[in-house]
Image (tube, coloured by chain):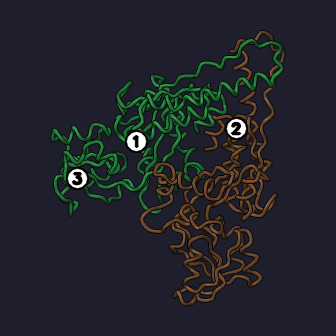
Chain colours: A brown, B green
Amino acid sequence: MTDTSNVNDSARPSRRGFITAAAATAAGAAVIAAPAVHAQAPIKLKFQSTWPNKDIFHEYAGDFVRYVNQMAGGRVELELLAAGAVVPAFQVLDAVSSGIIDGGHGVSAYWYGKNKAFSLFGTAPAFGWDADELLGWVRYGGGQQLYDELTQQILKLNVVGMLTGPMPTQPLGWFKAEITSPDQMKGMKYRTVGLGADVFKEMGVAVTIVAGGEIVPAMDRGLLEGAEFNNPSSDTVLGFPDVAKVYMVQSYHQALECFEVLFNKTKFESLPKDVQAIIR
Amino acid sequence: MTDTSNVNDSARPSRRGFITAAAATAAGAAVIAAPAVHAQAPIKLKFQSTWPNKDIFHEYAGDFVRYVNQMAGGRVELELLAAGAVVPAFQVLDAVSSGIIDGGHGVSAYWYGKNKAFSLFGTAPAFGWDADELLGWVRYGGGQQLYDELTQQILKLNVVGMLTGPMPTQPLGWFKAEITSPDQMKGMKYRTVGLGADVFKEMGVAVTIVAGGEIVPAMDRGLLEGAEFNNPSSDTVLGFPDVAKVYMVQSYHQALECFEVLFNKTKFESLPKDVQAIIR
């Protein structure tokens, strides 16, 4: 599990590396007298995930933070925070846009309530491709341009977003009893997100949309009768087996998904160009 | 298609960005008098791929070069070269180790002749996982340690290698006639690589191992009767449809593969720590 303290520990050698590099640059430049060279203090950026601290997805966010901090050689220092540290998971997009936090780690499916087009990036059509191919379309096939149009022009959000981290097909989720027919899900209080939420509603399911960290408590209190979050590792750590004994492991509701990294656009564009390239 | 010239073009804004950053650092430091600040000249590194210039894999190598150059802000400048520019494709590993070139882009399967253990990283076991999971094992499951042991301790090569870039399942390849039975491949002069080469030899196939760029000329001259390289896009650009009319699109010989980026270890370790992190 990655937490803020060991992210900082891991970044230390890089900061030392940067001081050496800065000293070398100064020595190579036409400096007449330089009694001491101090590297600039790092630009600190608050980076909150949409994941509970114990979820492996928060560990992914921690990996991203550590890589950026190491690659930037101490010039920026992303501070990793878990869901709820500053704002709840579902408010991360707005909080990044308004600058309450500088960046965020989550999934586009969480913003489906703002605009159904987020489904293209979070709960994309299930057939004919996988998450690697989704990312190929985003980076080389025009997907990023549509994403930027959606976030910046249509929703007028002050964010830059990048999609990364392909995920495998997600199971249908956790239930009290085995699901052998769609009829069993009619009227069931079931948690899912994105396009799948609308499809299940059409099927008569009582879909309830909550953030990942809130699912198990809701099932425990009977507010949910079935739920999917994402994958066996996350689900186990989050405690799903304690509140439901049946795990249905195939589905089409999210055959492919990827993570979304967000930054406040004004803040991002104020960073040195090479640090922007590192973050991208 | 990415070539050396547009890689350099793309890197230009980053170099300007670095000069600004270096100036800001100097201004923030305790410099008494600094009439002019010049960024250090970039460390130039010769980076040769194992791919022909027109192959999309050489374009991948070009993407890697462009990303590193941008992220390093002009402190290093990888120069992209195609297979044969300095050494033939199959000599890239030795050339990186001896320092004839500083880095290389290829696949571990090309070094199977040196040690069959390269199969773990180039022609890995076909069942139960995909290339994303292979990379997960490399980065988080002990694979990198085995790779380092193989290259640095067993083969005494002066290289650091990193695995990246997951590939989908590879087709059986291009033939003069449809293959409907393994018997048809008995005695056939067929190009493949890695563990698959040994499996096909056991099946009685006359396996001939050549680099990607040499396959189509060899088929054209009758030195090969069948061949697989990698994927429909690469194969089409390399001219396979001109020399064989039947493409068999399913196979188990390379269900998963990834790219390999190599650097001369001495050179790599002489780079600033944050540039090392960028390359990794």
Q: Residue at x 77, y 54 (%)?
A: A81
Residue A254 location, quadrant? bottom right
Q: Which residue is mark 2?
A: A271
Outermost residue toward the top in this view: A32
Q: Position of residue B160 (x, y in %)?
A: 54, 34
Q: Residue at x 37, y 26 (%)?
A: B85
Labels 1 and 3 positioned on one and the same chain: yes
Name the front one of labels 3 and 2: 2
Marked residue chain, label 2: A
Mark 2 lies on a secondary structure that is loop
Q: Which mark is residue B204?
A: 3
Q: Is residue A56 left or right of residue B153?
A: right
Q: Is residue B185 left or right of residue A147?
A: left
Marked residue chain, label 1: B
Does residue B192 show up?
A: no
Name the front one of labels 2 and 1: 2
Q: Which residue is mark 1?
A: B57
Quadrant for the N terminus of chain A in the image: bottom right
What crowding class fits label 1: few (fewer than 14 Cα within 10 Å), some (14-19), or many (20 or more)? many
